[in-house]
Amino acid sequence: MKKLMILGAGVYQAPLIRQAKEMGHFTIAVSCPGDYPGFALADQALFLDTRDRAGILEAARREKIDGVCTSGTDVAVAAIGYVCERMGFYGLRLSAAENVTDKWRMKEAFCRGGVCTPPFEKISSPAQARQAARRLGYPLAVKAVDSSGSRGVTIVKEEGQLEAAFWDAMKVSQKGYALAEAFVKAHEIGVDGFVKDGRLTFFAPHEKYMFRSDKAAAPAGHRFPYRASPKLLREIYRQMQLAAEATGLDACPVNADVLTDGEKVWILEIGGRTGATCIPELIFLHYGFSFYEKIIANALGEPVDFPAPPASACTPCEGRLLMSPVNGVISRIDEAGLNRLRQAGAQIVVDYPAGHEVEAMKNGTNRIGHVIARAETQEKFQKVYDAAQSCIWIGDETLRRLNERAGKGGRGE
């Protein structure tokens, strides 16, 4: 039995913990104290901030772990690089981890490596933000450089919103600066993959749905496959390879936000971990293998390969978050209705029981749950998703009705 340390114990690390236990490994979940599902699932819990590199390294040595990994969060990536390097594990290097967990360093690396990315500037004060805006123009994105889940990200449409956006970014950041980025009007997709021996050996582009408010946008779901011309797919792959090389990513999963317009491609961001919002589950449905299993094997220094599945095996599938447009309390959950949908093949998770307070959707941390299903078309998936929303009440109204009244319809954009 090998001992695996998993950084994070939330809803996006819980499946990784389950997979590691199914593979027969001893699991240690590391996170700040809180009501996180991973603590109950793991064999051992350690209460540490996943940004505390020294503390995590000390714990890793004390527990004599065989590997370390995470899923769905950028916050823990730097500590993974630190532990891998100091303990001689196969995996992400610290310099690469630091490049991809600071958006300004990442963008600088992109420029040096010839990666196509939107224009940007480092900003350390509202005055610098105004100067950057004059050069970049409106709208523009103001981003915390070291957060994940779209926290600290604001789309600024006019100068009057700029100072508040800067301070919103600083509130969630450990750094003394933020990023101002030109807003490129293009189609946003996601790309997940795996880098091994310096090459992108697994490449999985997918459609992305965004939940948009007046100020910000957050990933709300994904759909496989992403249908595009061979030429565009080659350019996405080329830019992803350049981004991995520029940042030094290797021996790790990768996740990126990508813009496309015709056959033009921009890399917004790349991370040294797999994506959240049901992406590993959708990879399993579409490609037929467990991405969590690959991540775990890689962390333990075991060989990892990605055989191409036959085209007939690549079933269209989709996953979306359940989310509320308002603050409220879950007043009722129709478990019988949800179970009927599950028996028909849908995977439905509700994170909280009836009586639990929920927050209006702002970023990926405000989710209520998710729905995943195989579906030939978006319309077929929408029927399943709407039915699931109709089984959950926030106050006196169903989640479906609340989203329809808010103009969201549960679809994102």
Image (spheres, rainbow, N blue to C red):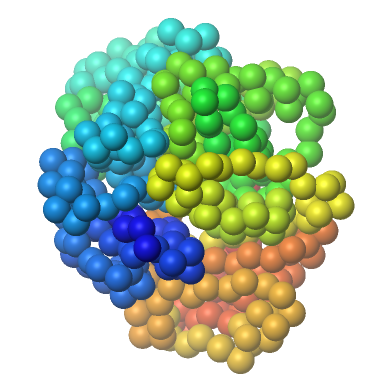
Task: Say above or below: 75 vs 328.
Answer: above
What residue is rendered at 41% in x and 85% in y? 354
* Image coordinates for residue 259, horizontal then vertical, percent: 60, 28
The quadrant where residue 262 appears: top right
Q: Nearer the viewer, residue 9 or 173?
A: 9
Q: Is residue 208 left or right of residue 20?
A: right
What residue is rendered at 71% in x and 75% in y? 345
Q: How many marks?
A: 0
* Quadrant assignment for the N terminus: bottom left
The quadrant where residue 29 appears: bottom left
Task: Say above or below: 22 vs 244.
Answer: below
* Image coordinates for residue 199, horizontal then vertical, percent: 57, 24
What residue is rendered at 52% in x and 23% in y? 198
Task: Say above or below: 279 vs 136.
Answer: below
Q: Is residue 87 visible?
A: yes
The quadrant where residue 184 appears: top right
What residue is rendered at 55% in x and 17% in y? 242
* Image coordinates for residue 332, horizontal then vertical, percent: 47, 87
